[in-house]
Image (tube, rainbow, N blue to C red):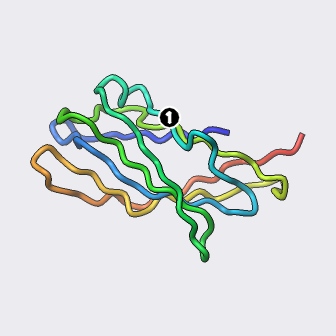
Amino acid sequence: MELQISIRSPAGKEPAALQWEITIPRDQLSFGEPIASPGNSVQADGKSVLCATRAQAATGPACVCVVSGGVSGIRNGLVAVLHLVVTNRASPGHARVAIRHAMAVFQDLTQDPIADVEAHVKIRRE
């Protein structure tokens, strides 16, 4: 299963780097290998996506992802493709994926927080 992460920035305010944390419900999803692949807007800018997992007792597994490389701004479009695996314990329905603690870093090293978002992915058993 793939979850696409995109960005849309105002002209002249494109971040040079991004960071975010993703949490998933442990009884329904796990992170794939690799966790994420770079999107076309990141690849076009010569940047890379690096994600590392960490356990989180209260909300389930989490991973922190960073998009960085070079000083050019990240253009609008697909930034990363998150790879998720449906667990054997998952029931059909929806699973909540939360993106939190996101931050945009600009060329002058100033930072702007990005609002938390949630996505619901549909789980089907076939």
Q: Amino acid at mark 1?
A: Ser
Residue 95 placed where, x, y %?
69, 57
Question: Quarter of the image containing the C terminus?
Answer: top right
Residue 77 placed where, x, y %?
39, 32
Residue where numbered disc 1 is placed: 37
SS type, badge 1: strand
Question: Quarter of the image containing the N terminus?
Answer: top right
Q: Residue at x 28, y 41 (%)?
A: 9
Residue 108 placed where, x, y %?
9, 48
27 sits left or right of 50 in the view: right
Residue 50 placed where, x, y %?
42, 43
Q: Residue at x 55, y 42 (%)?
A: 82
On screen, residue 114 above or below 40: below
Nearest the eye: 12 or 31: 31
43 sits left or right of 37 in the view: left
Question: For residue 58, what is the image quadrant?
Answer: bottom right
Q: Residue at x 52, y 40 (%)?
A: 36
Q: Please identify the residue farthest to the top as the structure is shown.
A: 44
**Number of numbered callouts drawn:** 1
108 sits left or right of 72 in the view: left
- Label 1: how many residues lie within 10 Å, few (<14), some (14-19) or many (20+)? many
Q: Please identify the residue farthest to the left as the structure is shown.
A: 108
Q: Please identify the residue farthest to the right as the structure is shown.
A: 126
Question: For residue 57, what is the image quadrant?
Answer: bottom right
Nearest the eye: 12 or 106: 106
Q: Residue at x 26, y 36 (%)?
A: 69
Question: For residue 103, what is the image quadrant?
Answer: bottom left
